[in-house]
Image (cartoon, rainbow, N blue to C red):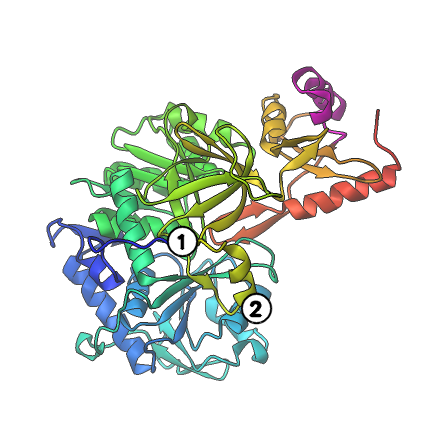
Amino acid sequence: MRKTYGPDYPRTLTALTAWSRRDAAAPVVTDAGVTFDRDAFQDRVLRIAAGLHRAGIGPGARVGLWLPNGIGYLAAIFACARLGALAVHINTRFRTAEIGNLLRRSRARALVTQWGFAPVDFPAIFAALPAEDRAELRCVLGLHIPPGVTELAGLPAMPLDGAPADAGPDEAAGDAPCLTFTTSGTTGGPKLVVHDQQTIAAHAVDVARGIGLDGADAALLGTLPFCGTFGNVVALAAIAGGAHIVGLAQFDAAEAVRLIRRHRITHVIGGDDMFARIAAASGARRFDTVRFSGFAAFHSTTAAAIAAAEAIGMQPRGLYGSSEVQALFAVAQGENRLLGGGIPVSPQAEVEVRDPHTGQALPLGASGELWINAPSRFVKYLENPAATERAFDADGWFRTGDLGRLTERGFIYEARMGDAMRLGGFLVAPEEIEAVIQALPGVAGVQVVAATGRGDPVPVAFVQPADGTNLDAAAVRAHCLQQLARFKVPARIVLVDAFPVVDSPNGPKVQRVRLREMAEALLRDAGSHPP
């Protein structure tokens, strides 16, 4: 049975806004240089709720949120929850095919977007959608909507604002579906993960306590997109802890460095590449206020990025999470600090490693599939009961699809099960081979996948040379022969200018499926594997 939170946690997002014991006059969020305290933030929530209420949004309605990070997006999350509506988070990197697919599948009734955001013309992209993708929508509500604009692509367009007194009654409920994230994948592949309010609110409290966002002077650099679980969890944990969120509508390394120093940021959390860019923009000056930093590894250059961050005073820790169990589910500890996984932030969470074929629990140190039973677990996949049923066992344990192993300090995430390679009879994580190649001078990035061609699976390495280097594929393979068991040595070293990527809610991710297709084609064309 699914674990639930106890009575000493907030049950709704409305309750979460009052959870912190910090002074009500303390800053909640700074957006474009303007700072909001708790009263000002609550006023913005009520004004947006009034605009949504005027548009007919109430319990059970689905509202697409397609906005850049900012006070408007953050307040809209709480406004939807107050009305009992389901917020459908839309990645700002998505374009017509992806947005249309998401709106159609989520059956959103209203879309909240923004006019006048220079990097992305949201209204123009929306207007280009096929009519069938907008069939369920009844209206568009806009932040910064220009005077005189009353329609968009044939739908009523209204300002997302109103009088606080018109916000309607508070319909927030603990078991009400609260938001849906898209899982990582291609346009047709992502599932829509639904969480209820008590799960979102209570996990935010556990994260705030677990990483110190409830400290008296805590301040978070808000760089992660709110549309994904990574950015959403971090922002709501800051609200729960009473921390000051200093936001960036879009990431800029030099501006991030300036904000860290100006606002004495204590918490920096993001992808590994973000830390590399901050370090490069820091001028080698150390940060003396950052006391917690955490990263998710999205690239093969993680080790170099984290070393650069450590050189300027940060001590990043590996994080683990997913759309289904939420981000910052676990934080790495001790000697495993730079690995994904760690100890769950919720004291009620349980993690097991099971044999992917038999389902039997495995002992410490043995690699298998990670299974999780935790109160932060999602409720269902939207409009997909078959996928929901496959995700759980009879006791409520969630099958993550991740490869990992248990340790004395929690667990270690190794790879997605689909990325793990069966080589020479052994299960091998691609990161093991990637780390060896990445250590070579002149390597900017590397991705390793398994392919069969016409024989047993063998590894194939796609290597991106650093600018201005003359990397030699034969030398890379010779290095691997010295460092790795023969069955782990890549059968092909393929030099590439760039890796194929797909935009996820948490940032660009390498399309390993596409790399596997490329590797299979290479081996088939070659006719046989090298000796």
Under mark 2, the amino acid is Asn
Lower position in the chain sequence, tag 1 or tag 2:
2
User: Is 483 included in the stretch rendered in magenta?
Assistant: yes
Under mark 1, the amino acid is Arg
Mark sitting on residue 247: none
Can residue 248 be seen here? The reply is no
In this view, the mark in front (1 or 2): 1
Question: Badge 2 local density, few (<14 within 10 Å), some, or many (20+)?
Answer: some
Q: Which residue is mark 1?
A: 377
Q: Residue at x 39, y 83 (%)?
A: 150
- Residue 38 x %, y %: 16, 57
The answer to whether 106 appears left or right of 143 in the picture is: right
- Residue 56 x %, y %: 34, 82
In depth, the one of 264 and 59 nearer the eye is: 59
The answer to whether 69 appears left or right of 40 in the picture is: right
- Residue 276 x %, y %: 45, 33
Residue 475 against residue 426 in the figure, above or below: above
Residue 184 against residue 524 in the figure, above or below: below
User: Is 411 included in the stretch rendered in magenta?
Assistant: no
Q: Residue at x 63, y 31 (%)?
A: 428
In depth, the one of 89 and 159 nearer the eye is: 89
**Secondary structure of residue under mark 1:** loop
Q: Quadrant of the N terminus?
A: bottom left
Q: Which residue is mark 2?
A: 101
Bounds of the magenta span?
Answer: 471-492
**Secondary structure of residue under mark 2:** helix
